[in-house]
Amino acid sequence: MRDLLITGAALADGTTGDLGVRDGVFVPAADVTDAEQIDADGLLALPGLVDSHTHLREPGREDAETIATGTLAAARGGYTAVHAMANLDPVTDSAEAAEYLKALAGRTASAEVIVVGSVTKGLAGEELSEMGLMNRSAAGVRMFSDDGKCVMDSLVMRRALTYAKTFDGVIAQHAQDTRLAGTGACCHESEISGRLGLPGWPALAESVIIARDVELAQLAGGRLHVCHVSTAEGVEVIRWAKARGVNVTAEVTPHHLYLATREVESYDTTFKVNPPLRTDEHIEAVREALADGTIDMVGTDHAPHARQDKDHPFDIALPGMLGLEQSLAVVLEVMINTGRLDWPTLVERMSYAPARLSRTATQGRPIAVGEPANLVLVDPSARAVVDRDASASKSRNNPYHGRDLPDPVLATVWAGRLTYRR
Ligand code: NCD
Ligand code: ZN
């Protein structure tokens, strides 16, 4: 691997200098020899982004995404690590499945793949999966989630939190009470869903589960992470729980920060997602929560789907949308360009916090001599119209297609290797 010399980049704190990279770590610029040079004058260098929530689809649905294409999309979005959700086929519910995924990633990935194990066997919500064995396996799993499905059984959830605590594991919950919506719920319950005749999810289907889970986390003394918080009520419960010292973290997706439920008026199934896009009051609440730290991090919930799974009536199409390639662009647009967030806090929300979630030591570290060489070079002022066909992802369910957004990522370095350069 060739040395890298990155000249003139500014760090998030405003300091400027040259960066050397050798053997996967940052070294003094004067130490590199025969280096590939990158002129980063006028650019920002941020620590590599870490996604707390990615669906890679391999194994099982390689027609929608593979580890190779999903992590390439990650690299193009400035990410150097992704947490690979367990709703695969086979489900990541055993040490063997976790090790298989890690080995596959070792051969094909353009970013670190952090394996997430399921909470229950087969995501069935009944019997705990082999959490301890997955933790002690070569995959070193420390995060567990049935994401895509909510762990509805309170006793199962209590046991999961109690058990994971013994090895500092975290339970990441897809908080959505399936009993509070009729079958076929496919968007946010509001005036719009009523008018369109689409069954909706009420906002409180999310907050009642978060309320139950923070109580269980306190009882068990375990770590809880709330996936894709999308409602003002959910934010309020998390704020209350944090004030009481509950060990809880939360994420928000780029799409819940930016897109509203009015998009479903087109019946375009690209905009069908779980939890659903909400109204402006909810969008304002999650933006505020990301700014004040009630929501700790951004998780993309990158959810590629093949065309044949989206080309259906709205209530039948599979839920989920892409996120990795435009995540930084969206956060830049709605949080930085509006003055709600500064760059050091963005680094905390998009790199440091998600790495801490799974205790991943190789990620979420500052750009400094001796640290792992993970970084993204950013031009904060570049803009472009998003083209879904220019994506590295195998799928085309990109909700930002045709929109004018920041286009910030110029290069990504993962473990000393250039994984993307425009
Ligand atoms: C996700 C998927 O497709 O795997 N879908 C979605 O709508 N978000 C599952 C999930 O994150 O809940
Ligand atoms: Zn989910």
Image (cartoon, rainbow, N blue to C red):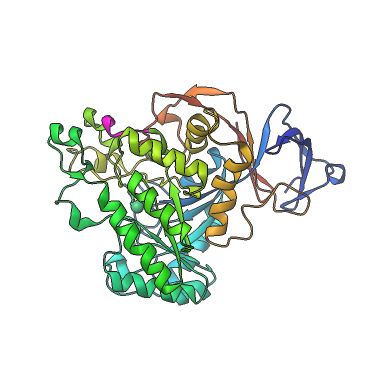
In the shown orientation, is residue 120 left or right of residue 299? left
Taken as a whole, is the magenta stretch helix, strand or loop? helix
Tell me if I can see residue 91 in this picture.
no
In the shown orientation, is residue 186 left or right of residue 151? left
In the shown orientation, is residue 26 left or right of residue 12? right
Examine the rendered structure and indicate whether residue 373 appears above or below residue 171: above
Examine the rendered structure and indicate whether residue 274 appears above or below residue 257: below
Residue 185 appears at what percent x and percent y?
19, 46
Residue 146 appears at what percent x and percent y?
35, 62
Tell me if I can see residue 253 in this picture.
yes
Residue 417 appears at what percent x and percent y?
67, 46
Examine the rendered structure and indicate whether residue 173 appears above or below residue 261: below
> At 52% from the left edge and 56% from the top edge, which residue is drawn?
113
Which range of residues does the magenta coloring cover?
259-263
Nearer to the camera, 378 or 38: 378
Residue 154 appears at what percent x and percent y?
29, 69
Question: Residue 350 sits in which quadrant?
Answer: top right
Total marks drawn? Answer: 0
> At 54% from the left edge and 46% from the top edge, which residue is drawn?
349
Nearer to the camera, 356 or 116: 356
Nearer to the camera, 63 or 180: 180
Residue 297 covered by magenta stretch: no
Examine the rendered structure and indicate whether residue 298 appears above or below residue 149: above
In what quadrant of the picture does the C terminus appear?
top right
